[in-house]
Amino acid sequence: MPKERQVGMKTPPVGQKSESRKKQKRNESPVKKDEAKKSKFRESGIIVRVDLEQFLCHTNFGIDFHPNINFIHGTNGSGKSAIIAAIQTCMDSRASETHRARSIKQLIQNGKDWARIKVTLKNEGDEAYKPETYGKRIVIQRELNRHSAHKYSLISERGKIISNRREDLDKILHHFSIKVTNPCVLLTQDDARDLIGGTDPRKMYEFFLRATGLREMKDDISAIQSKVDSMERMIESENIKIKDFELKAAEAEKEYKTCEHIQDLDNKLLKTRKMLLWSKVGEFEEELSELESNLEKVSKRKEQYSQQLAQQGEIDQKSLNRKMKDQMTGKLKKLVDLKNQLTQEVESKRETLRSTTDHVMRIMPRPEGKFPSRTKLVRKKQALQKQLEREKRKHGDFFVAEVAYDKAVKDLKEANEDLRLSRELLEKEKEIYKDRRENWKDSRSDLQTLVNLHFNCILTRQGYYGQLVFDDKEKELTIEAIPAHQEETAVTKALSEGEKSFTIIAFILAFSDLSLFDAPFRAMDVFDIFMVRNYFHKAGGGGGANSQ
C-alpha cells in the first residue's frame, strides 16, 4: 500500500493507461522503472484474492484484487459489504464487529450447515512471513459450522496446511500489522455512516480513539483496573480468612496446652510399660541365678558321693556292706541326672534372658539400680491408664490436639504469606495502571495535536482552514472548517454537503498520514455518498473501495 496519498488523486481502471503515462514509461530507464515499481506496491501482506462459499449472500464467489486500488460496486444486496465482513471474520473479528450478525453462525447462509472463507495474502519481499514455510502466498481459511466448532487453517502456496492454531494466525496478523478492528484499516458501513453524518461528537471522539489505537490502550487499562479491583476484593476476602485462621489457631493452641498434661501421663505410662519389660528381665535373671545356685549345690553333692564311693573301693570288698553301696550308687546316679537337667534348664534360661534383654534394649536402655517389683509396676500401670482415660474423655486426645494445632499454625502461616504476595502483586499492578494511564493521557494529547495538524494541512491544500475541537471530559469531538476567504469557522453540520464530505475525507486522511500503523491494505465500505451520489443513483446501489 503506498505511504503517500494525495486528495483527489485518480487511478485509471485496471488494464487501462493514459497516453501520457505510456509516454512517461517509455522515457523511464529500467532502473527507475524498478524503483518506481518497488515503491508503488507492497510485496507482502496485501490481499490477493478472496473466496467465499455459502457465506451470507454468496454461494460460490471469488474475486482477485489489483495491488493498488480496487473499486467494488453493485446493486443493494449484491454482497459488497459481505466481502468486507468476510475479511473481518477470517481475520479473527467477532460477528458483532461486522455489523452483519450477532453470532458467527448467523453468517452462514440460511438452510446451510457450513460456510468457508479464504483470504489469500501476498508473501514476498523482505517483509515476508516465513517464506521458506508458506512460500509466496499465505491462505487464511476459516470454516464456519452451525453444529460444531469453527476452524482456522493456515495454508501454504502449495496447498499444504501449515497450522490450525489461532495463535499462529495472530502472529501473522501482527507481523503484517493488520488490525481489521481499526476503522482506518477497515471502515464498515456503520462507521462510514457515522462519519458521513459527522454530527454526533461522541461517535466522532470514539472514532478518534479507535483510529489512533487509543481505544485498545484504554481497554487494556480498563482490564488492568478490573484486575486491580478484583485483587483488592480478593485481599479483603483473604483478610477475613486470616482472622478466622487466627481464631482457629488460638483455640487450637489453648486446647493443645490443656492437653499437655495428658502427654505427661502418656509418657509416664509408656515408661511404666518399659519398666515392666525390664522387670520381666529381672525375674528371668533371678530364676537363672536360682537355677545356677541349685546346679552348683547338686554338683558339689555329686562330687561328695563320687569321693565316698572311691574311698569305699579301697576297703576290703568282703567287709563292704552291699546294701549301703547300692544306695550310694543310686543317689549318685540321681545327682548326675539332676545335674544334667539343671544344666539344660540353665542354658535355656540364659538363651531366653539374652534374647529378651536384646529385645528390651532396643526399646529402652537398662535403667540403673534395682527394678521395682512387678506387682507394684502393674498396679502403677493400671492407675495411670485409668487416669489417662478420664483426662482424654474430658479434654480429648493429645495427639489429635497437637495435629490440629500444627495444622492451624501452618494454615495461618500460608495465609499470611499468600496475603503478602497478593499485596506485592497489587502494588505492582497499581504501578502499571498508573504508568499506563499517564502514558495514555500523554499519547492522547500528542495524537490530538498531530491529527489536528495533519487535518489542517490537508484542508489548507484545498484552500480551507479548520480544526478538531476535543472535549476529553465529555468525550466529544467537533470538526470545524471554513473556506480561506471566510472569517468565522463552522461545524460540519453547518457546511454544505460537498464541504462536509471533503472535510470528513480530510479527517480520515489525517489519521493515515500519521503512520501510526503500516497496514498493508485498507478497505472502506460506502465511504462517501454525496460525492458519487449521481453515480450511485444511476447504478441503483452503493459502492465500496479497497486500497492496498
Image (cartoon, rainbow, N blue to C red):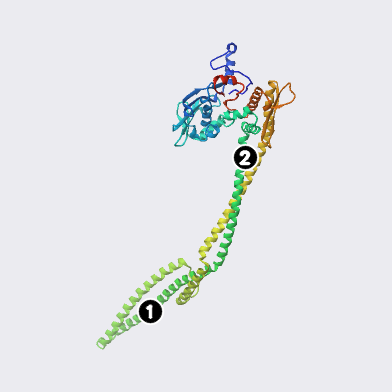
- Disc 1 is placed on an element classified as helix
Question: Which residue is most to the right?
Answer: 487
Residue 126 point in image, percent of width and height: 55, 25
Where residue 515 sits: x, y (%)?
63, 27
Return the disc, 2 or 1, that comes first in the chain's sequence.
2
Q: Report crowding for label 2: few under 14, some 14 to 19, many 20 or more residues within 10 A (C-alpha).
A: some
Residue 260 locus on image (x, y percent): 55, 67
Between 266 and 168, the one nearer to me in the picture: 168
- Tell me, yes or no, if residue 188 can be seen here: no
Comparing marks 2 and 1, which lies closer to the viewer? 2
Q: Measuring 60% from the left and 38% from the top, which residue is drawn there?
A: 219
- Residue at 38% across / 77% down in the picture? 291
Determine whether, in the image, residue 124 is placed left or right of residue 318.
right
Q: Which residue is mark 2?
A: 221
As drawn, 311 above or below 284: below
Question: Type of residue at label 2?
Answer: Ile
Residue under numbered circle 1: 294
- Farthest left residue in view: 318
